[in-house]
Image (cartoon, rainbow, N blue to C red):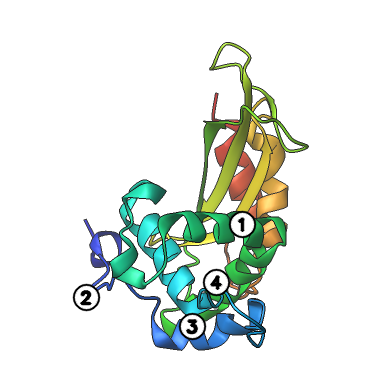
Amino acid sequence: MSKDHSEKPRNVDYFQVPKPLWKRIKKLFPQKAKKKGRGRPRADNRAVVNGIWYVLWTGCQWKAVHKDWFGVSSSVIHERFQTWQQNGIFARMMKIMVKFYNKRRKVKWKWQAIDSKSVPAPLGGSQTGRNPTDRGKQGAKLHLLVDQRGMPLAVHITGANRHDKWSAEDLIISIVVKRPKEKNSTCVRTKAMIMTMSIS
């Protein structure tokens, strides 16, 4: 196995978003309003983002996050996560993070891979569909395109009944980093379409 394939994050701080990355994404979040009257002050955005960062890194349940870790309760972290998701903040953050990754480590363009995961969506919504692998229950499908190291370059959400091959073009178009031109190389779009069409 080559070095690129076996690389693992080093010295990852699961409790705090790296400072260079935070400087780039902090403007995406609502500014803290000045406190008026009584009541608790609004939870700090940085603390909430750190809590979300921890959940995404570890895969733990929201309620498993202790308040003394970030100074914010798990319910506030989850509520803020849902609100920011609905406002499209994470979609904009994804673009910034891909550019940040390309600047720091450079995207590995030799090959990319596309995969998907079906998840339950009992509350329904515009991006759901009947999941053929879950007795026709409402579900969504997360489509992901990664580079040679496994770094996500694009994410696309559809109903669980949508075949992977129909999302390949959406994923490729969504990549915010420009692919460098290479001589005698096969078009990435063709590669991705062939890969997804082979998925049953």
Q: Marks 1 and 2: CB-CB under 8 Å?
A: no
Mark nearer the N terminus (2 vs 4):
2
Query: What residue would you read off at disc 4?
Result: 98
The quadrant in which residue 129 appears is top right
Q: Marks 2 and 3: CB-CB under 8 Å?
A: no
Quadrant containing the N terminus is: bottom left
Which one is nearer the viewer's eye here, 26 or 115? Answer: 26
Query: What residue would you read off at disc 1?
Result: 188
Query: What residue would you read off at disc 3?
Result: 22
Q: Is residue 191 visible?
A: yes
Up-down: is 53 above or below 126?
A: below
Residue at (26% x, 65% y) in the render? 7
Mark nearer the N terminus (1 vs 4):
4
Q: Marks 3 and 4: CB-CB under 8 Å?
A: no
The quadrant in which residue 96 appears is bottom right
Secondary element type, mark 1: helix
Residue at (31% x, 54% y) in the render? 58
Locate residue 74 relative to residue 78 in the image: left or right.
left
Up-down: is 41 above or below 2?
A: below
Where in the figure is residue 84, as x and y percent of width and height?
Answer: 64, 62
Q: Amino acid at mark 4?
A: Val
Mark nearer the N terminus (3 vs 1):
3
Query: What residue would you read off at disc 2?
Result: 11
Which one is nearer the viewer's eye here, 157 or 80? Answer: 80
Secondary element type, mark 4: helix
Mark nearer the N terminus (3 vs 4):
3
User: Mark 1 and mark 4: span between their CA atoms?
Assistant: 18 Å
Give the crowd class for mark 4: few <14, some 14-19, many >=20 residues within 10 Å.
Answer: many
Up-down: is 131 above or below 56?
A: above
Secondary element type, mark 2: loop
Q: Is residue 187 visible?
A: no
User: Mark 3 and mark 1: span between their CA atoms?
Assistant: 31 Å
